[in-house]
Image: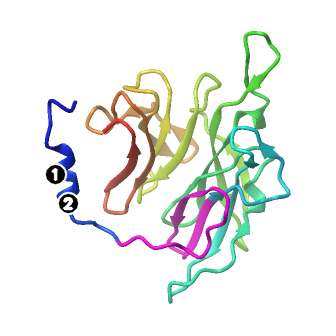
Amino acid sequence: AFKSNPNYLTELKAKRPLFDVKASTISSDKSDFGAILTNDNYIYFASARNEARKTYGWNDQPYLDLYQAIYNEDGTMSEPTLVESVNTKWHDGPAAVTADGNTMYITSESFNENKFEKSEDKKSKFSRMYLYKATKQEGGSWSDLKPLSINSVEYSLRNPSISNDGKTLYFSSDMPGGLGGEDIWKVSVNGDEYGTPENLGDKINTPGDESFPYITSENMLYFSSNGK
């Protein structure tokens, strides 16, 4: 890859920044990530700040929950609060919300459906990350949390992002047919019906890992990669 484009790093360093990055007031001393800003000025993000939660062994931090905060016109943000109705006993988040603010897609675990893989010695159970859908009710609460039909105990789906028209859901997954360990995929959405997931191909995905897709209202796709 380097030989095919030996000036890559030099050209990358020469680019001007597209954004100014500043620390936010809603961050904690734990993991906080996957933030989105909705059209009704809510910020949703995943966080491990809930000390009441049991500790996750891989990083010695509490299990993730989904939080929300209000983004004010002056740029300040309210104190984050738990999105109680969508959080489970397992990892929850990140999430995506449709442009009309009525539908949420959220990452959680297959343990919620009592589905898992067992280790070879049958002594350990391993969950997969599943995508769920929730609907906003009058008063602003979320309910009717249900798993998407494209979930599978054979692989994980996570990090959702929904197109502006609500008809295409982007996500990352290690499902078969990809180009690397984790790729970015998309699937058509028609109410509660979903098409066949499509890999975004080698212009986006690499033999490495691509994750955290975010599709803007102008159809600009942002994502992370360790394979570029």
On residue 15, the disc is: 2
Q: Is residue 77 left or right of residue 187?
A: right
Considering only vertical position in the picture, is 66 above or below 101?
A: above
Magenta region, residue range:
20-45
Residue 211 or residue 175, whichever sits in front: 211
Across and down, in percent, residue 121 comes to 78, 10
Q: Which mark is residue 151?
A: none
SS for dot 1: helix
Name the kind of residue labelled 2 in the image.
Answer: Lys
| Residue 175 visible to the viewer | yes
Q: Is residue 101 left or right of residue 30?
A: left
Instruction: Say whether residue 169 is visible.
Output: no
Q: How is the image coloured?
A: rainbow
SS state under label 2: loop
- The residue under the point 48% across, 44% down is 189
Picture residue at 54% right of the left edge, 76% below the top: 41
Distance of label 1 from label 2 (alpha carbons): 7 Å
Q: Position of residue 100 (x, y in %)?
A: 52, 66
Instruction: Reply above or below: 197 against 125.
Output: below
The answer to the question of whether label 1 and label 2 lie on touching residues, with beta carbons closer than 8 A, is yes
Question: Residue at label 1?
Answer: 11
Q: Is residue 36 found inside the magenta-colored segment of the image?
A: yes
Residue at point 61% right, 68% down? 27
